[in-house]
Amino acid sequence: MNMIVLMTAAGAPLAMLGLSTPVAPQRNCIFIVHPQITSAVFESKEGKIVFPDRPTEHPCSYTKTKGGADITFTNQNGWRFEVRVGRGDEGRWTAGLADDAVTGRAFSPFGDGK
């Protein structure tokens, strides 16, 4: 899995999470603006959390599970991201900071290409 699309909880396109290769427990990931993002989504709470500043590579943990894959990392503003994609290439993402959290849908458009 090298690319995961993140959407808002309402299903609006938000970002693409690019993952470095080769597959290893420790990889690097970076958010890329989704080509179909709207200005309203970019300015939303989710947009400000995912894109707080300039694009930054983040060391991320990639774990294959029986049900798919889990990716975790912390962005430059301290938000802890957890992305879980199941065998059907669909899943969820969450970002949390202290008592605040956002969540949305996730999917891997190219499947588990490792």
Image: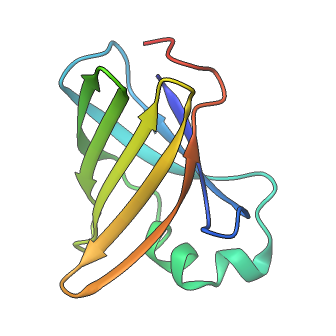
Q: Is residue 62 left or right of residue 38?
A: left
Instruction: Tell me if residue 53 can be seen.
Output: no
The number of callouts visible is: 0
Q: Nearer the viewer, residue 37 or 110?
A: 110
Height in image: 113 above or below 32? above
Q: Position of residue 44 (x, y in %)?
A: 62, 84
Q: Position of residue 75 (x, y in %)?
A: 29, 62
Q: Nearer the viewer, residue 52 or 87?
A: 87
Name which residue lies at 37% across and 17% down. Answer: 21
Name which residue lies at 54% across and 32% down. Answer: 3
Which colour scheme appears in the figure? rainbow
Q: Position of residue 113 (x, y in %)?
A: 51, 11
Height in image: 106 above or below 81? above
Height in image: 55 above or below 63? below
Q: Position of residue 8 (x, y in %)?
A: 62, 66
Name which residue lies at 75% across and 82% down. Answer: 40
Q: Quadrant of residue 22?
A: top left
